[in-house]
Structure formats: structure tokens, C-alpha cells
Image (cartoon, rainbow, N blue to C red):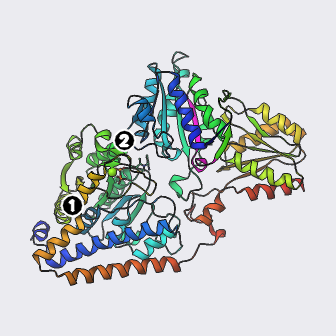
Amino acid sequence: MTRLTYREALKQGLREALQSSDKVFLLGEDVGRYGGSFAVSKGLLQEFGPDRIMDVPLSESGFTGAGIGAALGGMRPIVEIMTVNFSLLAMDQIVNNAATLLHMSGGQLNVPLVIRMSCGIGRQLAAQHSHSWEPLFAHIPGLKVVSAGTHEDARKMIMAALLDPNPVILFEYTAMMNLEADMEDPLPAVDLSKAKLRKSGKDLSLITYGSGVYKCLHAAGELAKEGMEVEVLDLRSLRPIDTEAIVASVRKTHRALMVDDAWQSVSISSEVSARIMENCFYELDAPVQRLNGLEVPMPYPKHLEDAAIVQPSQIVNKVRQMLG
Amino acid sequence: MTAQEQTMKADASLKMKLLRQMLLIRRFEEKSAEMYTKEKIRGFLHLYIGEEAVATGVTAALSPDDNVLATYREHGQALARGVDPGAIMAEMYGKQEGCSLGRGGSMHLFDAKTKFYGGNAIVAGHLPMAVGMALADKKMKRNQVTCCFFGDGAAAEGEFHEAMNLAALWQVPVLFVCENNLYAMGTALKYSHAVTDLEKKAPGYGIASATVDGMDVLAVLDAAHKAVDTIRTTGKPYFLVCQTYRFRAHSMFDAELYRDKNEVDEWKERDPVTRLEEQLTAEVALSADDVLKMKKEVEQEVDRSVDFAEKGTWEPVDQISRYVYK
Ligand SMILES: Cc1ncc(C[n+]2csc(CCOP(=O)(O)OP(=O)(O)O)c2C)c(N)n1
Ligand SMILES: [Mg+2]
């Protein structure tokens, strides 16, 4: 067992990826000399040199497109978009090139590219810097979209994403950077396509991903003290979504509550809810419920920000209601 | 007398005004840093210390009818534009008495009455908007200038290049002001740009450009007057590059691994505030007492802004969904 912060887990994952092949290189804004905007890549420039750890100018569309090109050319780039907030500048490259080339070329050209981006919510960064845009990417056929809601995934998802022949979008969470957790060393590889039960229970399914995972585990712990056995399903893969795992959980608990910070309308939670209706409606003892971020651009003051994102106490209250 | 000649003859009182303005920005920023460590200000905070001459000089060449757009490092521009210091400090506290009602914080200062249009935290995101504002002025036959501040890093973004081309294509009155402080976060100019003389990017688009010592407020004022005069008479865009330096970290989270302390110290020798202060003391026999008095006034003004912010109130949570739609 070793004890690592989420940041160290990400760095270890990156290091393993870089060590796995000379074709792997990291490119992104301030990944090298600055040490990474969240210090994830700090020290890697010294370890691997400037050809493997490439600082790029502010030009999200440009360097993401270059990453796609390099992948087509046989390299295995890892593109870091500093935060999800800036990903819209690269969206055209991601959607119109990375996600579509395989199909448009009749299967001739695949894009084995990993794009990492961190999501920073809950740090009073206001409207332009607090986005939860997993649903935007999960909407796009041709992409794989995964979300590292635990230390294990922070450490192992990068390598799994690299081994995938498709473009993979990997979400990381800034609010968790300093969180510590124990993990096995070495840690076995992870399967990118499967959801994972982080805690099992028989009374209700909390279905979540990303920054919701630890929140839900915390809430489940509180509820256990009151005798409620709630299970926590971490979706991990947001495209494709592991419908089987969702159905299996609902069959067991007969109640489902979706939890995530993204805006609710047309979101992952809408999608999961629809899949439950389609696949196991008759298993439900209560309507599916959802807790999401409030549908406003993120306000700056702490009290309003807290009100705009899902709090563990809200999860606890909602579950009590649903079981009460 | 042309505006240019006026600048040349900038009298003592104008220079005093410029000095006071720069002192206010300097002191305000130092206070902001202090309030950040006291956790009164949260989120991201980007300080303008070292770059005061740019906002001060450029803004002094504008008229109140002109539009101003800036980045997340915009407290200096907002102050120079005349946005109330109390309203800025309250905004950084997140109080509803702030210039954006507390919704925006440090990176999103807005003040429609002084035509200060933010406060944009997506690098280069405001350049196309500036072109559009100038286009509206042109269509509505208003003889106004839109002044858009941004960094050297922003000049690498596609939006910079698209905005330059559109502005030239449409011949709109926009002043692009690049605050070249040599770094985009931790990425030095030479790692961002193949051609580091940024003013050279303009001619390719058919835009007139100039570069100026951004540590010399009088030089900046002069260059800005020239630029604004040109824009007002021709209706065409103009690109002004101000060579400057930030004395502080990029934001409050920056360990500054990417630059040498000596480099920072060398630039501090060129402190724009001290420079004008010394010049004024020599030229117009500004006495040490006068300077002290000015500093004291500025100090009081900054303290008042903090008092105002402290006394401000929190917006009730039940109003959170306001301002999503009009
Ligand atoms: C589109 C976009 N990409 C990345 C960032 C993160 N970021 C914020 S400021 C900054 C550096 C900008 O440098 P520059 O334009 O030179 O302005 P300065 O901060 O030096 O004033 C970066 C990379 C951002 N806010 N927006
Ligand atoms: Mg800069």
C-alpha cells in the first residue's frame, strides 16, 4: 500500500504512460516550465525532457488539432487542455476531426489520442472557470469519455486510455488534488468501459461520477449510521455508459438517485434516468430522482456557489426522503 | 494644437494626475493581495503591479465615450477608467455592492456607466467582441474608439488573428493594446511566439502598429494619443504593443519556477511609479512632502474601499437565479 494524493496519482499515471513507449508525449499549456497549472506534471520536464513534455502557446484549437495529426502520424500524444473551460476553443478539432475521422474515412484512419482536462468546480472561480461539461463531450459519437472520480482511476485511466485506439477524453478534478488515499502498489490495470460499484447496499442506488463519487460515499457513510444501506455506483465511463451495471444495481435496490454537479437539463443524469425507464421501469419502487448543479452560470461568492452545487447534506436529505 | 502636441506639453498637473493614478493602482493591488491572504478575496487573483503605466497611459488618451475591454488582470484598467474603487473591492469580496453585484469577482469587473466591459477570463475571448463593438460604433456613426487590452499570450490564440483580420477587413475603430509582460503564465514569450516582435504581426493584416516602453507612462500616453488620433481620423484599427513586466506571480497560486529572481529585480529597477515620481521631483520640484501627501490620500482612498467592501452585504441565496435571462 502507498498513500498518494489525487495529484500524485495523476502524475504517477502520466509517468507510467510516458515510460511505456517513446511515442508517448505530453503537450499542453504550462505543462513543463511552469510545472503544470495544478502541479500534476511538475518535475516531468526534468525527467523526460522537452521533446516529451512540450509547452505550447495559448492555442487550444491549434495544439489539439496538432495532437490529432500526430496521432494520425503514428505518435501517441497526450493533450492536456488546462481546464475544461478552455476546451470549447478546441471543440471543433475534437468533434469534427478526432471524433469523425474514422467514420468519414470509411474506417481507414483512427485517432488514438488522449485528451486530459481538469474540471475545477467549487473554488470560487466564477462563471467562466467553473464548468462541468462532461455531458457536452458524452454527446459525441466517436469519442470515449471517462471520468476519474477516484485515486485508482486518476492513476490508471491514462494508461488504459492510451491503449484504446479511439480518441479518449479524460476528466480530472481539481477540487480533489490534495485528497489522500491508500492504494495498492503496483495497481492492476483498469477497464475503461465499465462502471464500478464503490460501495454496495440494498436500499437505494446513488449513481454518480467524477466529483460526485467521494461526495456520495460520504453521504452513504452518514446514512449507514441511520441504518440505511445505500450503494454507490461510479459510472466512470460516460460514453459509452455501462447500462448493464445501472440495471443490475436498480434491480437490487429498486430506487435510484443520480448525483452530479453538471446542469440537469439534457445531461448524464437525464440519460441515465431514461435508460432506467427503458430497461428496468418495473423494478422501480419509486420515481428516479436527480440532484444536479443549479442551472445558472456559476456565481462568485461562496454562499451562492455552495447553493449552486450539490452538497453531501442534500444527498443525505434526499435519500432520507426517498426511503422515508 | 493637436492632441500629440498637447501630450508633449503635458503640464505638471497632468503628470501629477498620472502619478496619483499609478499610485492608486499600486496601493490597491497591494491591499488586494493582503485581503487575499486574509481570505476576504477568493478564487483567482491576478495583480497588475509593475504594469501600472500601461493602463494609466492608455486610458488617459481615451474619452469617456470610448469602450474599454480587458482581461482577468483588469483592476488597473478599471481604476484608471474611473470605476469606483469601493465597488471594485466589494466585487472582489463578492458583496452585492460590487460593480458586478458580486457575481463576477476579481476576474469579471463590469461597469456599464464608465463603459468598462470587463473582465474576460477566457484568454483572447474579448478581442472579437471588441471588434463587434467598434463595428456597432461605425454602423451607428459614432466617432468612438474601442480599446481592448490583452496579453502576449493572447496574441497566440486564433481569436487574436481572427479579430485582427476582421477589424482590418471591416475598417473599424478599435485599439488593440497588447500588454507584453513577457510571460503567459509560466511560458516565456519566446516559447509562445516564433516572431517575438509582436508589433510585426499587424502589418500582415494591414493594420498600423507601434511598440512602446510600457514602463514609462509618458511614453505610453504619447503612443496612445498617436494611436487614438489615427483611429479617430482614419476609422481604422491600430495595434499598440506595450513592453512591460509583472512584478508579482501570475496569480496567487504560482511558484514562479519559470523565471529568475534576478530578472524580476532588474525589471523592478524600471518601476514605472518610481520613475515618474523621480522625474516629477526633479522637474517640477515636487517636494518629498507633496509625494507623501499624495501617497497618504491614496492610502486613505484604498482604506475607504476596504471599509465599503467590509460593510457590504451578501446577496440572499433565494435570488441566485436572477440574471440568467433578461
Ligand atoms: C483560452 C484560455 N486558455 C487558457 C487559460 C488559462 N490562462 C489564464 S491566464 C493565462 C496566461 C495568459 O497570458 P497573457 O495573455 O500573456 O496575459 P498575462 O496574464 O500575462 O497578463 C492562461 C494560460 C485561459 N484563461 N483561457
Ligand atoms: Mg503576459
**Left or right placement of residue B4 versus residue B156 in this view:** left
Q: Quadrant of the C terminus of chain B?
A: bottom right
Q: Is mark 1 within 8 Å of ligand 2?
A: no
Q: Using the rendered image of the protein, determine whether residue A139 is visible from the camera's viewpoint.
A: no
The residue located at (24%, 39%) in the rendering is B195
Q: Quadrant of residue B120?
A: bottom left
Mark 2, residue position: B158
Q: Residues within 10 Å of mark 2 (few under 14, many from 20)?
A: some
Query: Badge 1: how crowded within 10 Å, few (<14), some, or many (20+)?
Result: some
* Pointer 1 or 2: first along the chain: 2
In the depicted structure, whether residue A183 falls above or below residue A265: above
Percent position of residue B210, x then y: 18, 52
Residue assigned mark 1 = B270
Residue A286 appears in the figure: yes
As drawn, is B215 to the left or to the right of B126? left
Which residue occupies 51% across, 53% down?
A: A129
Label 2: element kind: helix
Q: Quadrant of residue B176?
A: bottom left
Q: Amino acid at mark 2?
A: Gly
Circle 1 or circle 2, nearest the eye: 1
Q: CA separation, marks 1 and 2?
A: 33 Å
Residue A213 inside the magenta-drawn segment: no
The reply to the same-chain question for discs 1 and 2 is yes
Q: Secondary structure at mark 1?
A: loop
Relative placement, left or right, of B276 versus A177 is left
Q: Which residues are magenta?
A: A167-179
Residue B73 or A50: which is nearer the viewer?
A50
The residue shown at (56%, 21%) is A103
Quadrant containing the N terminus of chain B is: bottom left
From this view, report whether residue B309 is shown above or below residue A172.
below
x and y, in percent, of residue B53 in the image: 25, 64
- The x and y percentages for residue B40 are 52, 69
